[in-house]
Amino acid sequence: TRAMPRSVSLHLALVFALMAGPASAQSGRPGAAEAARTVGILCAECHVHGERGAPRTGHAQDWAARLGRGREALVARAIAGFGAMPPRGGAADLDDLAVARAVVLMANQSGARFAWPAPR
């Protein structure tokens, strides 16, 4: 497959962020709007179309094996980086809670029923 132009990818990321925000099952929870922005700006570039092997958000079959590992394992991989995904999705300034919320938002939109991460 041919890679999409970055401008199109970023446009789709913005659309995803807007769609994921208020319509999300997580809306109204602390940090939900920030998580939707993180997903839309940072994560969607790969997770909208499955670039570089990323599971596509909203496609339960892409996430099934990953969801079976549990929330903490998914969050740990996102923080440390895994496969083609760099640590923290390439945003070194994201704290663990922001990463966890972005992961849970995408996972829950893809069939999981993970608890919303709260500050420790």
Image: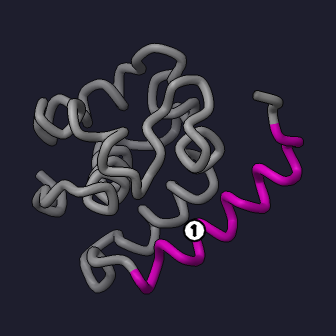
User: Closer to the camera, 13 or 60?
Assistant: 60
Taking the image as shown, residue 92 lies to the left or right of residue 55, namely right
Relative to 13, residue 88 above or below: above
User: Closer to the camera, 9 or 73?
Assistant: 9
**x, y percent for residue 13:** 67, 58
The residue shown at (59%, 24%) is 52
Q: How is the image coloured?
A: one colour
Prevailing secondary structure of the magenta residues: helix
Amino acid at the residue labelled 1: Ala
Q: How many marks?
A: 1
**x, y percent for residue 67:** 19, 39
Taking the image as shown, residue 96 lies to the left or right of residue 82, namely left
The residue shown at (21%, 31%) is 65
Taking the image as shown, residue 77 lies to the left or right of residue 4, namely left
- Quadrant containing the N terminus in the rendered view: top right
Magenta span contains residue 118: no
Is label 1 in a helix, a strand or a loop? helix
The residue shown at (43%, 37%) is 55
Taking the image as shown, residue 42 lies to the left or right of residue 77, namely right
Residue at the spot of label 1: 17
**x, y percent for residue 76:** 24, 28
| Residue 112 quadrant | bottom left
Assess disc 1: are there few (<14), some (14-19) or many (≥20) residues with their C-alpha within 10 Å of its C-alpha. many
Magenta span contains residue 21: yes
**x, y percent for residue 24:** 36, 77
The residue stretch that appears in magenta: 4-23
The residue shown at (55%, 37%) is 50
